Amino acid sequence: MGILVLMVLLGAQVSWRQGILFLIGCGFGLTLYHARFGFAAAYRRWFLQGEVDGVLAQVLMLGVATLLFAPLLLTGQGQGAVAPVGIAGLIGAFLFGIGMQLGSGCACGTLYAIGGGSSLMLITLVAFCAGSFAASLLDPWWWQLPYLPPHALIQDWGIPGLLLQVGVLVGIGLWLGRRRGGGGLKLWAGHWLRGPWSLGLGALLLALLNTLTLWLAGRPWGVTWGFTLWAAKLAQLWGWDPAASPAWNQGFAAQALASPLWTDVTSVMNLGVVLGAAWAAAWAGHGGLRPPGSLGAVGGAVGGGILMGVGARMAFGCNVGAYFAGIASTSWHGWSWIAMALLGTKIGIHLRSRLGLPL
């Protein structure tokens, strides 16, 4: 009931689109929680145990989203997540890969874990916000590093570019399927309200929800801009002057900083992810706040959150805005992001073991 009330209030105060986008954010949280759809843990299981289901589900999600995005992108009804490929972005994705292993979650994983009652992820979120805001103050330095102009296969080559990406994703899926030992991902839901849901169903729903976001918001799902904005608003309350920062004294960022948070699409959808996951956890009987665990876990949450925040700012997004939305938009930077994030993941897993965190 509370979710519906918030949706109506956002619709009345901002726009009907804002209300629906909040509800879509809740859908993301519900899906992520019930399908246990993770990124950091999926890569860790792949590297350490050879378990590929989590990564295979991501490939399915990317393939379906690519096909669903295409009509909107080709007809100009939405703008894809397309960004340059450069030194800063490659370093940022590498740092993000390390950070999501130390922090025990990614950007969207942090939000849905908080909704599920994880106090550790609250620590990760605070550190994430701080790292992202700090990195934004260094934007003029990142911008000076070499980079290639933004490119997307569907923009450069049209339908052939789209088919090329789909073919690559199918090839990766078949390769992972052989390593899985036969059989595809199942599409089942143990119970629609209580869960659990299969990874395959989660992949399809995430692709559909991201397409709805592209259609309604005019751009795909993003997460980390909200974290950066929250920290900037808090810093402003503490006396920080945005006029001295090129990243905040003009354009979209300056407008967002001067506007209420409920007018920001990313912030509203982030809240939806948390509330959707909390609703799912309550229905599943898993409500309640869990303690953060060991001192090593807290240290990992702080260090990992900061690295993810810095990395996401440098790399034009996180596992959602750069990887999921980027590849679904056929952007070159989405592919470079995941390549560097996987390299960082290897380092992060090693550091995770040094902190005594479970593998």
Image (cartoon, rainbow, N blue to C red):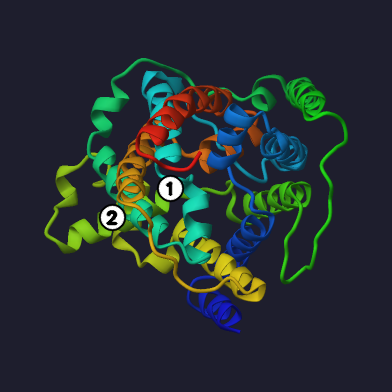
SS assignment at label 1: helix
Q: Residue at x 76, y 20 (%)?
A: 164
Which residue is at the front of the view, 348 or 313?
348
Q: Residue at x 14, y 54 (%)?
A: 240
Read off the residue under disc 2.
231
Name the N-terminal-most of marks 2 and 1: 1
Instruction: Report which quarter residue 16 is drawn in.
Output: bottom right
Q: Looking at the picture, how far across and down is residue 211, in whole percent?
A: 69, 49
Q: Amino acid at mark 1?
A: Thr
Q: Looking at the picture, how far across and down is residue 199, in whole percent?
A: 73, 48
The answer to whether any part of residue 68 appears in the image is yes
Numbered label tally: 2
Q: Looking at the picture, how far across and down is residue 310, in whole percent?
A: 33, 37
Which residue is at the front of the view, 259 or 338?
338
Q: Is residue 87 left or right of residue 117?
A: left
The answer to whether any part of residue 253 appears in the image is no
Q: Is residue 9 left or right of residue 120?
A: right
SS assignment at label 2: helix
How far apart, in angstroms, are the residues tagged by discs 2 and 1?
11 Å
Q: Which mark is residue 224?
A: 1
Q: Residue at x 72, y 40 (%)?
A: 57
**Mark 1 crowd level (few <14, some 14–19, many ≥20, 10 Å Cα):** many
Instruction: Report which quarter residue 176 is drawn in.
Output: top right
Quadrant occupied by the N terminus: bottom right
